[in-house]
């Protein structure tokens, strides 16, 4: 746009000062005399402009003030890279020594020519004979393939006014040529030139900033939704490929498919294949991994659950294909290959080429559709379905370039339950051709951005991804907090463009379409309280009482805000502790804050007025754990929003004492804990014993198939139940001795290997233990059984959870306390009750907020958590 008014030029300069890179040229009047004068300044901030429509033409022939402003705000600004072709000439008119961060494409071209690395086609590899010259027009023609280049207008009279249309066109295109030549030279000079992968493309669509951090700084880029499956992606992929290889090599798999398709059953076939794979691969794999890392045992059930879903899906596919081919060949004709690597090039809107590489997980053939299908494994549901479509579409298109035939694609998400998303070739091709080139060009621009420069890669358009971003904490530090126009930057490829595809379908057990893939954004989270403001107020209050502290940070939990304070040298921690009631008054909060010394600071927990609840379904999902996996119970959610669980095979948490007064949320805690058990194990692999003397805690569970026996409601039957558990413990130890095993998991591995059913672990939840303590005989018998079980039952897979509303010394005796190492204290009526439950002095459970606010003791450490709240019970 041609600007001649001073106000227009100044406004445009101010706008351009926010860009990180500008392409600049000048035209001079009287250029062939001893006193040339600046006539035009041409500026472009749009690298992909090919017509000059976005170029600014500043007519400064008689406006020295505008030139001075341009020098001051643009040329002297070190945060803006100014790109010229022959900078030494232009800088004579634009500030000379004041100019900073200047790039000269002529010098860059000279360096490349000297190193003999200049090429017409970098991907093809053919060398360019030495150019006749390194003028801008020559480079534009040879490197960027511009035609119809005007070479005459440069020598025209740039003093006369008005300027002709030819002169204005020439001035605009000079900057267009410059931006494209600069980009080509950068590509040629970069030793690590931008080759991208299909994963890069997916990440760039999910979040451009995360793509930048992954590509430039090699940071993690995998979105992991909360309560999902960290650390199982690589093991699952390796095992899935081992399953395919085993199926192709082991004749027993072929024998399973020898009957006709009409006589094959998908459930039976899946179970037989799972058994073969477990026996040949997975059993040895679990032993080897546990030997290397005992903590890995908790991950194995999730991996096995995912493999079960995948094998079940492949069983259905094999039976369908069996209708079309012989049993001896169906495996080989279904599983074409795995871990296939692809590469190809795409022409971008600016005319350059971009290399893309990719590697998908499996290639199968579907006889019903008579199509090859590339398969991508995902261990969990993808963060952005539209990005998922583009990634597998890219795989299909690259494979199409090799095989010259239509290629369908599928994404198999295996957890928490198996789902197959299938996409047809015609729709994939449209998506790739319409959206990929422009996105690749933007990705090139993003990876060239430098820190501390303006205009970084844009934020994600799907803001809910920020909540689960692996770089959430560092993003603001890396990029700042400025707002960007996501809708404009990402206008070409929004989730709506892709997710409305009629061929993108999901199914849980069949390849046939069942529903469209649509992107439903998460609701906006409830605004959190300003923790920094609370910290500032706390410091002020303490200092008003003569206690000098400094603010060290904060964290926001569902029910309270934790402020970290550092007492200054000479300030005793006790001086903070004694001010709890004063803080309640001064801050106007409902209950006294809980103040606790920590390593390096003192934490002050302030109750939230807008308290949130941790809903059970947001943290626990239905799963199917291996019978050899440890039994875990959900305790609550910590300050980071993560679920904290207790491993009942751990000596520190094998048995529990739980206490809390009326209104503390004890019953809801027990219900959520019980649900966390039965959601993860089938009745075959877990048994529950319930004692409910008040008859109100477990009414929904009275008919569940996990029960070891009917719910116990009277003292005589409670005594019998505990005696039965002692007998079962002793019986199991005799079996362990006979088989050479020392605990239930090893014994169950032994039974599975010999084809026998495993022994289920038993969890006994004993509600309101105090109701059985009035009768002396009952008390003695129960204490004896609890002592025996507490001391010996862990290895036998029998676990006790004893609860009470009255954690008094005469109820929770030393025998009980010493044999129940795991402790959970909900709100208590007194500090003494708190100390009895947690086994320590001044534990402050009496200051908890109720409704699931709890203290969890594991060993010598205490954790403040919010228990889960289950709105409904589902088996």
Image: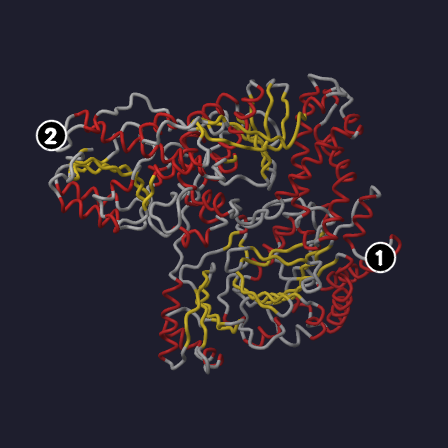
Residue plotted at (58% across, 54% down):
672
* Quadrant into which the C terminus falls: top right
Frontmost of labels 1 and 2 is 2
- The percent position of residue 165, horizontal first and vertical second, equals 17, 25
Q: Secondary structure at mark 2?
A: loop
Q: Between 695 and 629, which is closer to the camera in this rendering?
A: 629
Tag 2 residue: 162
Q: Which residue is mark 1?
A: 731
Image quarter in which the N terminus is found: top left
Where is 663 relative to 304, above or below? Answer: below
- Distance from label 1 to label 2 (Cα)? 105 Å
Left or right side of 716 for 366: left
Query: Which residue lies at the image location 44% right of the left edge and 25% below the top edge?
Result: 433
Indicate the quadrant where residue 285 lies.
top right
543 is higher (above) or lower (below) than 230:
below
- On screen, residue 265 versus residue 589, left or right, reads right
Crowd class of label 2 (few under 14; some 14 to 19; many from 20; radius 10 Å)? few
Q: Is residue 562 above or below residue 148?
A: below
Give residue 254's position: percent from left, percent from top.
Answer: 77, 26
Please, what secondary structure does the residue beneath circle 1 have?
helix
**683 or 518, which is in the foreground?**
518
Residue 422: image quadrant is: top right
User: Quadrant location of residue 205?
Assistant: top left
N-term-proximal mark, 1 vs 2? 2
Viewer-closest of 787 and 646? 646
Q: Residues within 10 Å of mark 1 (few under 14, many from 20)?
A: few
106 in relation to 628, above or below: above
Circles 1, 2 touching at the beta carbon (< 8 Å): no
x then y, percent, for residue 204: 45, 39
Q: Looking at the image, which residue is at 87% across and 54% down? A: 740
């Amino acid at each position: 746009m041609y600007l001649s008014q001073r106000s227009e030029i100044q406004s445009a300069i101010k706008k351009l000062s926010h860009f990180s890179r500008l392409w600049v040229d000048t035209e001079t009047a009287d250029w062939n005399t001893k006193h040339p004068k600046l006539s035009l300044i041409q500026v472009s901030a749009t690298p992909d402009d090919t017509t000059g429509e976005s170029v600014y033409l500043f007519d400064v022939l008689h406006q020295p003030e505008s030139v001075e402003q341009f020098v001051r705000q643009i040329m002297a600004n070190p945060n803006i890279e100014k790109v010229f072709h022959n900078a030494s000439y232009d800088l004579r008119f634009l500030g000379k020594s004041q100019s900073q961060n200047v790039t000269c494409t002529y010098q860059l071209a000279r360096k490349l020519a000297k190193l003999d690395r200049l090429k017409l086609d970098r991907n093809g590899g053919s060398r360019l004979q030495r150019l006749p010259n390194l003028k801008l027009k020559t480079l534009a023609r040879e490197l960027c393939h511009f035609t119809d280049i005007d070479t005459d207008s440069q020598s025209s009279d740039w003093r006369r006014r008005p300027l002709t249309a030819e002169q204005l066109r020439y001035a605009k295109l000079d900057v267009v040529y410059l931006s494209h030549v600069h980009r080509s030279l950068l590509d040629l000079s970069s030793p690590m030139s931008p080759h991208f992968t299909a994963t890069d493309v997916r990440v760039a669509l999910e979040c451009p900033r995360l793509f930048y951090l992954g590509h430039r700084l090699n940071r993690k880029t995998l979105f992991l939704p909360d309560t999902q499956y960290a650390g199982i992606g690589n093991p699952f992929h390796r095992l899935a490929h081992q399953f395919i290889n085993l199926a192709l090599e082991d004749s027993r798999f072929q024998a399973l498919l020898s009957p006709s398709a009409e006589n094959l059953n998908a459930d039976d076939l899946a179970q037989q294949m799972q058994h073969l794979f477990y026996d040949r691969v997975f059993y040895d794999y679990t032993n080897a991994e546990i030997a290397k890392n005992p903590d890995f045992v908790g991950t194995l059930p999730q991996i096995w659950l995912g493999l079960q879903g995948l094998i079940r899906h492949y069983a259905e596919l094999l039976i369908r294909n069996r209708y079309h081919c012989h049993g001896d060949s169906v495996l080989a004709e279904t599983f074409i290959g795995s871990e296939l690597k692809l590469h190809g090039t795409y022409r971008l809107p600016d005319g350059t080429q971009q290399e893309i590489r990719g590697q998908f997980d499996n290639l199968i053939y579907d006889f019903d559709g008579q199509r090859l299908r590339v398969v991508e494994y995902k261990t969990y549901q993808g963060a952005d379905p539209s990005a998922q479509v583009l990634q597998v579409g890219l795989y299909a298109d690259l494979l199409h370039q090799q095989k010259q035939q239509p290629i369908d694609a599928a994404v198999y998400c295996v957890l928490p339950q198996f789902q197959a998303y299938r996409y047809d070739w015609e729709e994939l091709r449209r998506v790739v051709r319409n959206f990929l080139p422009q996105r690749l060009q933007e990705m090139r621009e993003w990876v060239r951005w430098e820190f501390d420069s303006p205009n970084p890669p844009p934020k994600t358009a799907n803001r809910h991804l920020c909540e689960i971003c692996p770089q959430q904490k560092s993003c603001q530090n890396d990029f700042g907090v400025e707002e960007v126009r996501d809708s404009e930057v990402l206008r070409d490829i929004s989730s709506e463009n892709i997710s409305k595809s009629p061929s993108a379908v999901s199914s849980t057990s069949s390849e046939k379409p069942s529903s469209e893939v649509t992107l439903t954004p998460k609701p906006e989270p409830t605004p959190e309280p300003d923790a920094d403001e609370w910290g500032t107020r706390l410091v002020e209050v303490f200092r008003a009482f003569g206690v000098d502290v400094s603010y060290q940070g904060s964290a926001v939990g569902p029910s309270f805000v934790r402020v970290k304070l550092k007492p200054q040298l000479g300030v005793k921690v006790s001086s903070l502790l004694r001010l709890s009631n004063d803080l309640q008054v001064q801050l106007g909060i409902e209950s006294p804050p809980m103040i606790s010394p920590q390593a390096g600071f003192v934490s002050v927990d302030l109750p939230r007025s807008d308290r949130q609840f941790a809903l059970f379904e947001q943290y626990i999902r239905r799963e199917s754990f291996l019978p050899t996996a440890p039994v875990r119970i959900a305790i609550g959610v910590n300050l980071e929003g993560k679920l904290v669980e207790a491993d009942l095979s751990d000596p520190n948490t094998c048995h529990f004492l739980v206490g809390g007064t009326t209104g503390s949320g004890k019953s809801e805690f027990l219900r959520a804990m019980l649900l966390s058990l039965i959601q993860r194990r089938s009745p075959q692999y877990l048994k529950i014993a319930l004692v409910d003397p008040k008859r109100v805690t477990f009414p929904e569970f009275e008919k569940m198939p996990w029960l070891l026996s009917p719910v116990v409601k009277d003292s005589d039957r409670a005594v019998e139940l505990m005696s039965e558990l002692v007998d079962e413990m002793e019986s199991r130890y005799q079996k362990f001795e006979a088989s050479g095993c020392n605990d239930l998991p090893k014994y169950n591995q032994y039974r599975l290997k010999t084809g026998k059913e495993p022994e289920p672990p038993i969890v006994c939840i004993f509600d309101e233990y105090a109701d059985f303590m009035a009768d002396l005989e009952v008390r003695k018998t129960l204490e004896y059984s609890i002592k025996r079980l507490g001391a010996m039952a862990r290895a036998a897979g029998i676990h006790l959870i004893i609860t009470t509303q009255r954690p008094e010394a005469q109820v929770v005796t030393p025998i009980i306390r010493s044999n129940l190492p795991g402790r959970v204290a909900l709100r208590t009526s007194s500090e003494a009750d708190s100390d009895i439950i947690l086994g320590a002095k001044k534990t402050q459970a009496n200051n908890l907020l109720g409704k699931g606010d709890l203290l969890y003791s594991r060993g010598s450490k205490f954790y403040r958590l919010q228990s889960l709240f289950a709105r409904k019970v589902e088996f």
